[in-house]
Image (cartoon, rainbow, N blue to C red):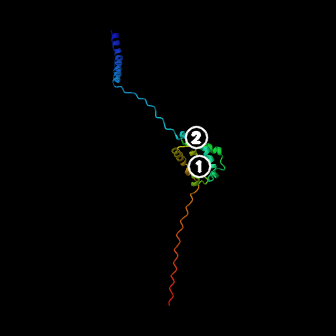
Amino acid sequence: MIRGIVMRFSGWPLAAAFSLTLLGLTACAEDPKPVVQTAAPIPAPSLYQRLGEKAGITAVVDDFVVNIAGDQRVNRFFKKTKIPTFKMHLVNQICAGTGGPCQYTGRSMKVVHKSMGVSEANFAAVVEDLQKSLNKFKVASQDQTELLNILGTMKSDIVTAPAKAKPAAKPAPAAKPKPAAAKPAAR
């Protein structure tokens, strides 16, 4: 007898759980909520990608170095430069700065340019040379601006020549006294 009672009661929790589960499923069926699966938004391409990744950056740098070599305003700064090493460092610097996987391992801009005497005009000339290359490869103006803003953060470490002082305005010459008018001779 005890065995029958235990069996009746031991099945009760299982039956209750089953009933509650059915009740829950029925409630869900009455108020269906559609499951909308959305894909993760596709991130916008980085500047590195928009520049054509490492191959695109390398093409621009190769052309840029040719522009510098022909630019009388700045080519003297590169006479002792090991051009293949310079190109490698510049590609890696641009690659890293624009979101690419590269790592710049060269010396700091402050150390490299410390005693070069680069002026504001020299810096502007190099920027012009870079823009010629970016235009040649049809880099969008927004991407050019973004790149130049990144590279522009190094300007204070590159421009090492003291700014030329503007010549002081010459003081106005002192007014010369007018000669006294000659008095007419008495008659």
Drawn side of residue 158 relative to residue 8, left or right: right
Nearer to the camera, 6 or 138: 138
**Total numbered badges shown on the rendered structure:** 2
Quadrant of the image occupied by residue 161:
bottom right
Nearer to the camera, 176 or 27: 176
Question: Seen from this angle, which residue lies furthest top?
Answer: 1
Residue under numbered circle 1: 129
Question: Seen from this angle, which residue lies furthest bottom?
Answer: 187
Classify 10 Å Cα crowding around label 2: few (below 14), some (14-19), many (20 and above): some
Cα distance, mark 2 to mark 1? 17 Å
Q: Quadrant of the N terminus?
A: top left
Classify 10 Å Cα crowding around label 1: few (below 14), some (14-19), many (20 and above): many
Q: Please tell me which residue is depicted at 60% across the width and 44% down the height of the picture.
A: 61
Q: Please tell me which residue is depicted at 64% across the width and 44% down the height of the picture.
A: 85
Disc 2 secondary structure class: helix
Quadrant of the image occupied by residue 30:
top left
- Against 23, residue 121 (above or below) is below
Residue under numbered circle 2: 56
Residue 33 position within the rendered picture, expressed as x and y whole percent measured from the top left: 37, 27
- Against 164, residue 179 (above or below) is below
Which of marks 1 and 2 precedes in the sequence?
A: 2
Do labels 2 and 1 touch, CB within 8 Å? no
Residue 126 position within the rendered picture, expressed as x and y whole percent measured from the top left: 59, 50
Residue 82 position within the rendered picture, expressed as x and y whole percent measured from the top left: 66, 46
Residue 2 position within the rendered picture, expressed as x and y whole percent measured from the top left: 33, 10
Q: What type is the residue that disc 1 sits on?
A: Asp
Report whether residue 132 is seen: yes
Q: Which mark is residue 103?
A: none
Q: What type is the residue that disc 2 sits on?
A: Gly
Nearer to the camera, 146 or 105: 146
- Against 178, residue 25 (above or below) is above
Report whether residue 103 is seen: no
